[in-house]
Image: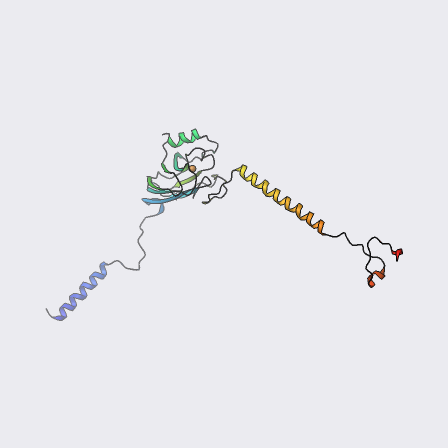
Amino acid sequence: MGARSWVVIAVVVLLAGCALMPPIDAAPIRGTETNHVATTDYLYVAATGDYGYTPDTFNDLPAHATINVTFVDNSTMTDGHTFTILGVEGVQIPNTDTQTQINALAFGNNPRALFNLNVSSYGDRNVSQFQSPGPGWYEFVCTVSSHFQEGMYGFIAFGMDLPSNLTLPDRVGIGGSTLSFSPVDAAAIAALVLVFVLGYVVWQRRRASSRMPPAPVRPSKPAAAEGHPPEVGRTQGGR
Ligand SMILES: [Cu+2]
């Protein structure tokens, strides 16, 4: 075979290779994949020091999918926390529910909880997974004694968004702060601040009044303006 033939073969092979290769700058083909039909998804949630979760709402996670959960303890509470997705669909649990009622929902079988993961101390991090149900929304709670009643709950929706009329706990320092005030603490702090402010105002007034000389008596005689400072208490006729 001559050199010319080799060149022809090389060009043919090169062209064939290019034809078989996918175009480099073409957009990735996503097919029918959307959030709703993903087969796996990841969820990251942290327990906070104010009896909260960050985030405390999850919208539109895929239904019928494997959900990988990472649960982190960002609180310094010594009794730990749980991330427990209750099995009852489309219901907000009243926050007047007792611990016994919460335990029945979380550990009973009517219906079974979707998922549970625990953390026990600050910095603790646990990973697990579960199969999400069909479209619907659920409440998740902390089952550690009294944490739910303190407002440790949130909501998660699969294959849909959460309804807009859910009430989330009104917490101080929501979003990862480890500061927390009970209503009694807050009232005590407010009272202290009030006492301090009142004390300061009274002190300022006393200081001002003790510094200020008695109001000068303005002389009515024009002569006073010519270099004879008026003497308080002396009458005009005394000169
Ligand atoms: Cu908790």
Image coordinates of residue 198 in percent, x first then y, are 64, 44
Furthest toward the left, the residue is 1
Q: Residue at x 18, y 63 (%)?
A: 13
Q: Quadrant of residue 63?
A: top left
Quarter holding the C terminus is bottom right
Q: Residue at x 14, y 68 (%)?
A: 6
Quarter holding the N terminus is bottom left
Do we see residue 17 in this rendering? yes
Note whether 156 is above or below 236 in the view shown. Answer: above
Do we see residue 161 in this rendering? no
- Foreground pick, 179 / 14: 179
Q: Residue at x 54, y 40 (%)?
A: 186
Image coordinates of residue 24 in percent, x first then y, are 28, 60
- Foreground pick, 98 / 65: 98
Image coordinates of residue 208 in percent, x first then y, are 69, 50
Which quadrant of the figure shows ligand 1?
top left
Image coordinates of residue 20 in percent, x first then y, are 22, 58
- Foreground pick, 101 / 136: 101
Q: Residue at x 88, y 56 (%)?
A: 238
Furthest toward the bottom, the residue is 3
Q: Quadrant of residue 3?
A: bottom left
Q: Quadrant of residue 227?
A: bottom right
Furthest toward the right, the residue is 237
Q: Relative to 21, is 41 on the left or the right?
A: right
